[in-house]
Image (spheres, rainbow, N blue to C red):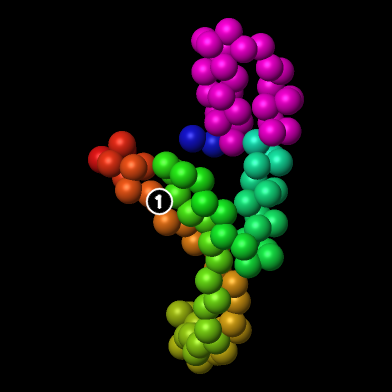
Amino acid sequence: MKYGEFIDTIYEVLSEQEYVIPRTDIKMIVDMTFDVIKDNLDNDDDLTITGFGKFFSKQADERIGRNPITGKSLKIPARKVPKFKYSKKFRDEIA
């Protein structure tokens, strides 16, 4: 599912429940939600959504990699990597 389809799906689900919210407002809410998640990860804060999962960031150490074309070794710098761990309830519901 792509972003536009995601917005349309939320719109359709809300419409079925007789909530009339314009697509532009839904898009704004979804964008704000993603911004909050990104801001938390950028500040090294975890974000736990009960029944869904936990967003967190982890520090990946510097390492030596290899260019697959030339075979030459290169240094890959340390970086922050976003992670997600789903909750047991979420796993049980989709399994």
- Foreground: 88 or 77? 88
Residue drawn 62% across the image and 12% down it: 19
Point out residue 89 in the picture as x, y percentages from the top left corner. 34, 42
- Position of residue 28 in the picture relative to residue 88 (left or right): right
**Magenta-span inclusion, residue 21:** yes
Quarter holding the C terminus is: top left
- Outermost residue to the top: 18
Q: Is residue 42 left or right of residue 5?
A: right
Q: Name the residue located 64 percent from the left edge and 46 percent from the top edge.
A: 34
Name which residue lies at 53% across and 84% down. 61
Q: What are the residue bounds of the magenta stretch?
A: 3-29
> Which residue lies at the image location 69% right of the left edge and 56% below the top edge?
39
Is residue 84 inside the magenta stretch?
no
The answer to whether residue 74 is above or below residue 58 is: below
Residue 69 percent across, percent down from the top left: 48, 80
- Give the dominant element type of the magenta stretch: helix, strand or loop: helix
Image quadrant of residue 2?
top right
94 relative position to 25: left or right: left
Residue 9 location in percent, x, y? 53, 23
Q: Which residue is mark 1?
A: 86
Q: Quadrant of residue 74?
A: bottom right
> Residue 72: in sight, yes or no?
no
